[in-house]
Image (spheres, rainbow, N blue to C red):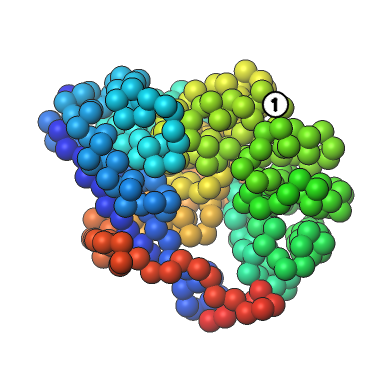
Amino acid sequence: MQIKKITASVHQFPIYLPMIDKPLEHRVLVFCEVETDDGLKGCGVTGAFLPWATIAAIEQEIFPVIKDMDPRDTEAVHHAVWWKVNPRAYTGVVSNALSAIDIACWDIHGKATGRTVAQLLGGYRDWAGTYITFGYPFFSIDQLVEYAKKFVSEGHTRLKMVVANDKGGWREDARRVRAVREAVGPDVDLMIDANYRFPPNEALMLCRAIEDCDLTWFEEPLHQNDARALADLRRRTNVPIACGQMEGHRWRLRELIEHHAVDILQPNCCYNGGYTETVKAAHMAQAYNLRIANGAGWPIFNMHTMAGLMNGWLVEFHWGMWQAGQKFFKGAPGPEKGKVKIPDAPGLGFTPEYDALAECRVKEPTGLKAAGMQTNEGGIVKV
């Protein structure tokens, strides 16, 4: 079996939230497909960052290097890419491009052997726990409470909300977190995510203000996932720290572990080099008795990691990427009662919806729409 063709394309799609009838943003994905000489196809995705550079890396830089290689030999594929395309271990575009290709290779391997990717990764179980990212920064406190109650009423018992975006600073974040905790009660897991935005002192002040809210984790609290500063924050709070979703390879993730900077490691196969690199990070974390969980979305790809590996834990169903899975992939599962079931079909267990992908394809950079959310000064969504 040999790799004979790799194609990649940029797609943009509108995101709608329940109870709001206009799109709040337009998300971007890079879709990749690998085809072998015997006609097997596998697919993978990566995210919105520098999508046109990612396309060029996939089709013009990496494909010529791995053409005619066996897609099941993922260690050999990674070795070739590292030393011929990325000898200085850069992350970013190279990691994103390699992620999409690697996921497609594992998809092909699964189809060739009749096994799911979760089984190929270790087969720990055929499901993973889930959580819902519901709390957007542009929601008012009343909207946060409304959406939190909505998802709890639908049977979801783990919720995540965004902090570090409000003009009121960490004090307003504390009020928002406390309002949600009071609304959903003590038996719902609640996480917060700062998306790198806090300086250390403000992150610490927020932690101290909400330590009695029983948070499951505080995700990416600090600029650049600074391992030294994260470790200091972790020593000074009882709120568990999680991060790692955008790190591009095992060495950056190792730094977080060795500095005792995290309670939960978050390797994301769509950004860090794919399943091949994620397995290395997960085993490293397991040696330190750390769980891994999915952050940065793309649940239908990361669910295989969380199900297949012994220390895999939770999959993030972020609303936009949840919608993307349902729109672009036939047979993509969703969360039910706090779990997502791995499909029985081999490989990823779902297949591309080519018509939907074609409808949302963007053929040149000028075709991309602005991705920002529309809010008023009070942070309430304008529709």
Give the residue displayed 61% in from the left and 22% down from the top. Answer: 286
Give the residue displayed 69% in from the left and 58% down from the top. Answer: 163
SS at circle 1: loop
Residue 219 image position (x, y, % from top left) = 66, 45
Res 174 → quadrant: bottom right
**Crowd class of label 1 (few under 14; some 14 to 19; many from 20; radius 10 Å):** some
**Residue 167, above or below 225:** below
The residue indicated by pointer 1 is 259
Res 10 → quadrant: bottom left
**Residue 216, above or below 251:** below
Residue 199 image position (x, y, % from top left) = 73, 49
Figure label count: 1
Give the residue displayed 19% in from the left and 32% down from the top. Answer: 64
Residue 350 image position (x, y, % from top left) = 33, 45
User: Viewed as shown, does residue 332 lie left or right of 381?
Assistant: left
Q: Nearer the viewer, residue 329 or 343?
A: 329
**Residue 98, above or below 18:** above
Give, as a three-letter code, the residue at label 1.
His
Give the residue displayed 33% in from the left and 46% down from the top. Answer: 54
Q: Nearer the viewer, residue 202 or 121?
A: 202
Can you see residue 15? no
User: Viewed as shown, does residue 346 lie left or right of 311?
Assistant: left
State which quarter of the image contains the N terminus.
top left
Can you see residue 201? yes
Res 179 → quadrant: bottom right
Q: Nearer the viewer, residue 99 or 85?
A: 85
Residue 37 image position (x, y, % from top left) = 12, 31
